[in-house]
């Protein structure tokens, strides 16, 4: 589990098969699922807001980095002002 200020933004199993679940904008999530067989609705998560990506090498690394960053940013955008200031080191 990967969290920011106690809020989950990425989830990976501890054993194979290797995958990662990431929060995603619902519209973008549908587009990603339609274009990549390795991207499916979030496994045991809210399928509207989460995608699970099988780490089989079929999803390009730049797209993986972008999806991880977007998931993090979605969670940070929902933090309180105080939490964001703490995160920024203020």
Image: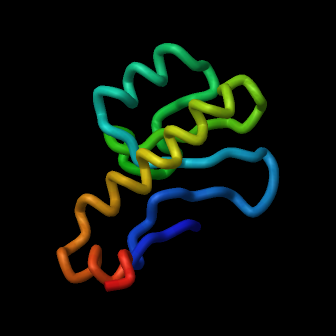
Q: Is residue 89 left or right of residue 59?
A: left
Frontmost residue, 83 versus 13 = 83
Residue at the image point whose x is 38% and y is 24% from the top: 30
> In the image, residue 23 lies at what x, y percent?
41, 48
Q: Give the quarter of the image for residue 12.
A: bottom right
| Residue 35 to residue 5: above or below | above
> In the image, residue 11 lies at what x, y percent?
57, 58
Q: Is residue 23 left or right of residue 12?
A: left
Kindly give the residue lying farthest to the front in the view shown.
90
Kindly give the residue lying farthest to the left in the view shown.
81
- In which quadrant of the rendered image does the N terminus lie? bottom right
Q: Is residue 59 left or right of residue 8?
A: right
| Residue 45 to residue 40: above or below | below
Kindly give the residue lying farthest to the right in the view shown.
16
Residue at the image point whose x is 77% and y is 29% from the top: 57
Frontmost residue, 65 versus 15 = 65
């Amino acid at each position: 589990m990967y969290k920011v200020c106690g809020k989950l933004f990425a989830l990976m199993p501890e054993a194979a098969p290797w995958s990662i679940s990431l929060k995603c904008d619902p519209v973008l999530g549908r587009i990603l699922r339609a274009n990549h067989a390795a991207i499916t609705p979030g496994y045991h998560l809210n399928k509207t807001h989460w995608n699970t990506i099988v780490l089989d090498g079929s999803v390009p690394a730049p797209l993986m980095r972008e999806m991880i960053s977007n998931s993090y940013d979605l969670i940070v955008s929902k933090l309180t002002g105080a939490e964001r200031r703490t995160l920024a080191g203020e």
